[in-house]
Image (cartoon, grey):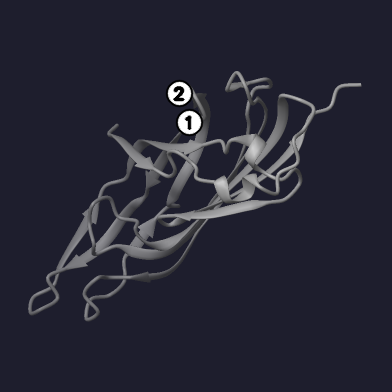
Amino acid sequence: MRLRHATLAVPFALAALAASAAQPKTDTFHVRMEGAYQARTVIAYQDNSGQADVTDRVILEFDWHDREHRFVTPPRLENVKSKVTGLRNVETSCPPPAPNGDYEHFDATAVKSRGGTTLDIVGVRRYPETRVTRYCQGSWKKATVPARTEEVVLHAGVPTLRQVRQGSPVSMKLGDWTWSFLVTPVVKP
């Protein structure tokens, strides 16, 4: 299994929100992070002959201590199954790929704090066995790309919570991912 890293956001620049942020009377906040992926993606492992339009989503929820930069509750993960449409070959004269199974772009398995406000979202990417056609500029060559699973680590950040207006969603586009954050104070009775 090959390890792949993708940097999504380190650090967050939410200073524009600081002026309008209400200062909460707590150091603990509930954070809901939702990542939405949308892009033309290679679904046959390292073979441009197998591409598709892919969407995927992952949702994380946890309570976070702002000053100590740590989880107060274990992160809860929700993975939404990847959707694959528009199968195509990079060479337009070639037939589209024929996957034998499902492609999963990112299936989160764990979230770890790296210190400060940086998180590692650990997961896997699953490529199905895929039948492709290559060299369509004359003679066609059919090939089967074997299935493969690889570990992927996305680096994301928790916004400095005192900079975020409580209850107001914040979104940012980072590469092919759009990350939305909803932060609310945890007030203990």
Q: Residue furthest front?
A: 19
**Which residue shows up at 52% across the image and 28% down it?**
110
x%, y% of residue 80? 59, 48
Tell me: 181 left or right of 137: right
Tell me: 149 left or right of 23: left
**Which residue shows up at 49% across the image and 42% down it?**
12
x%, y% of residue 38? 47, 61
Q: Residue furthest left?
A: 138
Q: Is residue 156 above or below residue 91?
A: above
* Rendered image quadrant of residue 91: bottom left
Q: Is residue 127 above or below residue 161?
A: below
Q: Residue furthest right?
A: 189
* Rendered image quadrant of residue 148: top left
Q: How many marks?
A: 2
Q: What's under tag 2, amino acid-wise? A: Arg
Q: Nearer the viewer, residue 162 or 135?
A: 162
Pick the quarter of the image with the C terminus. Answer: top right
Q: Is residue 170 above or below residue 158?
A: below
Q: Mark 1 and mark 2 in contact (Cβ < 8 Å)? A: yes
Q: Residues within 10 Å of mark 2 (few under 14, many from 20)?
A: some
Q: What's under tag 1, amino acid-wise? A: Thr
x%, y% of residue 138? 7, 79
Q: Nearer the viewer, residue 176 or 106?
A: 176
**Which residue shows up at 43% across the image and 49% down it?**
105
Callout 2: helix, strand or loop? loop
Q: Mark 2 to mark 1: distance in Å?
A: 5 Å
Callout 1: helix, strand or loop? strand
Q: Which residue is mark 2?
A: 114
Give residue 118's mark: 1
x%, y% of residue 135? 12, 70
**Which residue shows up at 49% across the image and 30% down it?**
119
Give residue 27's mark: none
